[in-house]
Image: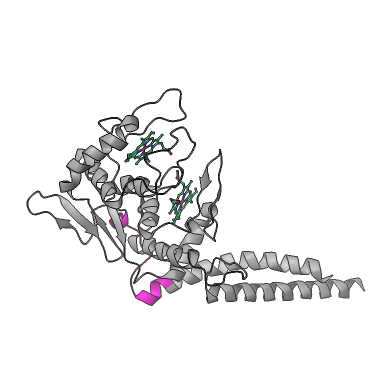
Amino acid sequence: MTWPVNVRGARLGAAAILAALVPLSLGVGAGASGRVVYQTTRHDAGTPNSDNVTINPKSGAVVSYGDSAITYTVPSPALANLGKALYMQNCASCHGTQANGVPASGTNGAYPNLVGLGSATIDFWIESGRMPAADPRSVQAMRRPPRLSHDQALAVAAWINSLQPSYPAIPSVNVKGANVAAGAALFALNCAACHTIEGDGDALALGTFAPSLRHVPATQVAEAIRTGPGNMPRFTGNLSDYQVADIVKFVTTEIQHPRNPGGLGLGGLGPVAEGFVGLSLGVGLLALLGYWVGERDRSE
Ligand code: HEC
Ligand code: HEC
């Protein structure tokens, strides 16, 4: 008699934790730091339309922009010549010498146009080892050890950006002021459906998959959020830079360094969330017990 009650109690617990956790953590996020975290405006969409823009006095070009949560930096134009040479060696055979893409008949996909993609996109695909592509006909490019160095990635991004300056530039995330609990709630809402709440990743439709997030550096997490690689949606104005920093902090701490290895895995959502599971389980059990006792009373 107790076994089915337990099972149903656990299900109730799972529903209750989702209902209870989200508004709770959002409240903490806004209150603890005293900033308006959950307001979303174009301000935060990875464009230089923000409080803090640095302009090169000579050329008038944007050098960096952003706020205290994320600074976006445009790779130095001085790197463009080196970047062009590296591009011709490593990329032009597929994406074309003008970087404007090559339609590839007979293959699964065209080689995409790179002109007009922000330097965050170029940097992400090179630094995550996806590019240069190992198998251009694969359904989805795989994360691999990068073949170009960080500086070489910046140089290629600088050259492509010189063809048509574009945003978002390369993010540098300041997680110091970020809120892990708020990041957990935002991750549950925006990311867990594909990547799972533990960040282990999962299969999606048509042979594609959402990868594990266990070994992705902070910059690449922010780049993925802002640029939406492959089949991942791009999050722009709907997540502020403060919210992106909260998510990055959650991914690079709780997901990548869980504090309860071997225990009951709850994505390391923290004592509040885990307390809620206990509470919901307990309340669920009590409710079912009451129900069961009531049923018995009536039937006897
Ligand atoms: C062997 C062919 C090949 C080479 C070489 C190659 N790419 Fe690609 N690239 C592709 C293909 C095919 C895609 C399509 C996307 C996919 O695989 O998911 C792609 C996608 C991309 C994307 C994503 C574009 C988008 O719209 O999201 C970027 C950025 C990119 N490549 C940059 C580069 C850079 C920079 C280099 C050189 C360092 C490079 N690629 C070298 C074949 C190649
Ligand atoms: C609709 C499903 C979906 C959602 C929602 C989603 N992603 Fe993704 N994500 C993907 C897919 C698919 C890829 C792989 C793209 C590729 O390589 O072509 C990916 C790739 C990534 C990567 C790169 C991982 C690597 O190994 O290089 C990161 C980081 C990432 N996602 C973080 C997030 C975060 C954080 C969120 C929430 C703000 C999120 N994703 C929401 C599907 C999703």
Q: Which quarter of the picture shows residue 100?
A: top left
> Farthest left residue?
58
Name the residue rendered at 40%, 56% in the picture: 221
Query: Percent position (x, y) of residue 266?
Result: 58, 67
Name the residue rendered at 76%, 71% in the picture: 288
Q: Is residue 111 visible?
A: yes
180 horizontally vs 299: left or right = left
Name the residue rendered at 32%, 48% in the picture: 123
Considering only vertical position in the picture, is 266 above or below 123?
Answer: below
The question of residue 232 being in magenta is answered with no
Write down the region rendered in magenta: 29-45
The question of residue 31 being in magenta is answered with yes
266 horizontally vs 24: left or right = right
Considering only vertical position in the picture, is 6 above or below 78?
Answer: below
Q: Nearer the viewer, residue 285 or 117?
A: 117
Query: Percent position (x, y) of residue 223?
Result: 36, 52
Task: Identify the image quadrant of the C terminus.
Answer: bottom right
Query: Percent position (x, y) of residue 34?
Result: 34, 75
245 horizontally vs 23: left or right = left
Query: Percent position (x, y) of residue 58?
Result: 6, 51
Name the residue rendered at 54%, 60% in the picture: 197
> Farthest right residue?
300
Q: Nearer the viewer, residue 109 or 35?
A: 109
Considering only vertical position in the picture, is 43 above or below 133?
Answer: below
